[in-house]
Amino acid sequence: MRIAIFGAGGVGGYFGGRLAEAGEDVFFLARGEHLSALRRRGLLVESVGGDFRIPQTRATDDPSEIGPVDVVLLCVKAWQVPEAARSLGPLLGPETFVVPLQNGIEAFDQIADEIGPERVVPGLCKILSFVSGPGTIRHAGVEPWIAFGEDDGAQTPRVASLRRAFEGARGVRVEVPSNIKVALWEKFLFIAPFSAVGAVTRMPAGVVRSIPETRRMLESAMREVVTLARASGVALRDDAVAKTMAFVDGLPAAATSSMQRDVIEGRPSELSNQSGAIARLSKAAGFSAPVNECLYASLLPSERRARGELTP
């Protein structure tokens, strides 16, 4: 397949690298020093599952240099999705579809508003990875897993083609869930509370889960997400929180989320797309989410400072 990786960070760099390693026709959209390194010496992935290198990568910051592709894997941060969606035009041929892999539940609608819902196939992934230096991705933990599927659950040739591409790649587990909406909310149930509690406490998974008070805060935030999901028409199972906490318990003790790392390092983060979305959507549905609202309010000043909106 001819595949564009829009955003070659921890997610796009890893999954795009594996697809390229498997012989797929992969193009990377990146910028800055990361782009320069990709052009100069290729992509290096340092992985707990075994390092690998793509010595020659086709990388650019201009979609028009790539042209139409079969599929775009949109791997930018959640807050960058609207701008990225407006830049997709040169990549779109008659049959091109876009798979967003953000932490959140609003990317599908944001992209559909720009290019039409028929071009968007919802997706999600699980991996602990990040850019450790220009041209270098560090996969530090969690079995790399990617899932996608049509919004209406239909079994289509385009989804089958992308699944085959990932099945040919090493170091990736691929799935096409029977209900992609449930899968998206199950991911959101984990990532939004885990990111916010980690960012507020500035502690990794091992600490957060081992202190009773922070563990209860995390569980309470998750229960609010279950309530919101059900109000949104997505019936998460009764054991959803327990299963998600079991996943947290299985994370490496030093695990952190990308949002947490961005907050701690003073960069713009996905706060508005995670805790902010829970607070906003709960209010719109007619109820409150006090734990997530508190987490959001606690992190908002540092977020605004990171975006240059606040001078301490």
Image (cartoon, rainbow, N blue to C red):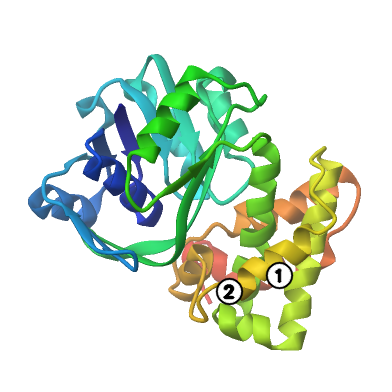
Q: Quadrant of residue 238?
A: bottom right
Where is 2 relative to 252, above or below?
A: above
Residue displayed at 67% across by 24% down: 152
Residue displayed at 20% across by 28% down: 65
Report whether 193 appears left or right of 141. Answer: right
Count of numbered tags: 2
Q: Residue furthest bottom?
A: 211
Residue in front for this viewpoint, 135 or 311: 135
Quadrant occupied by the N terminus: top left
Q: Quadrant of residue 178?
A: top right
Query: What residue does disc 2 label?
Result: 199
Where is 47 relative to 122, above or below?
A: below
Report whether 246 appears left or right of 111. Answer: right
Residue displayed at 25% across by 25% down: 64
Q: Residues within 10 Å of mark 1 (few under 14, many from 20)?
A: many
Instruction: Tell me which amino acid carries mark 2.
Output: Ala
Task: Answer whether labels 1 and 2 touch (C-beta < 8 Å).
Answer: yes
Instruction: Tell me which amino acid carries mark 1.
Output: Leu
Query: What residue does disc 1 label?
Result: 295
Locate residue 287, reporting x and y percent: 90, 52
Q: Dot 1 lies on which element?
A: helix
Where is 60 relative to 307, above or below?
A: above
Residue in front for this viewpoint, 290 or 253: 253
Q: Dot 2 lies on which element?
A: helix
Residue displayed at 71% across by 42% down: 182
Disc 1 from disc 2: Cα separation: 9 Å
Locate residue 43, reporting x and y percent: 19, 53
Locate residue 232, reporting x and y percent: 81, 40
Locate residue 168, reporting x and y percent: 33, 39
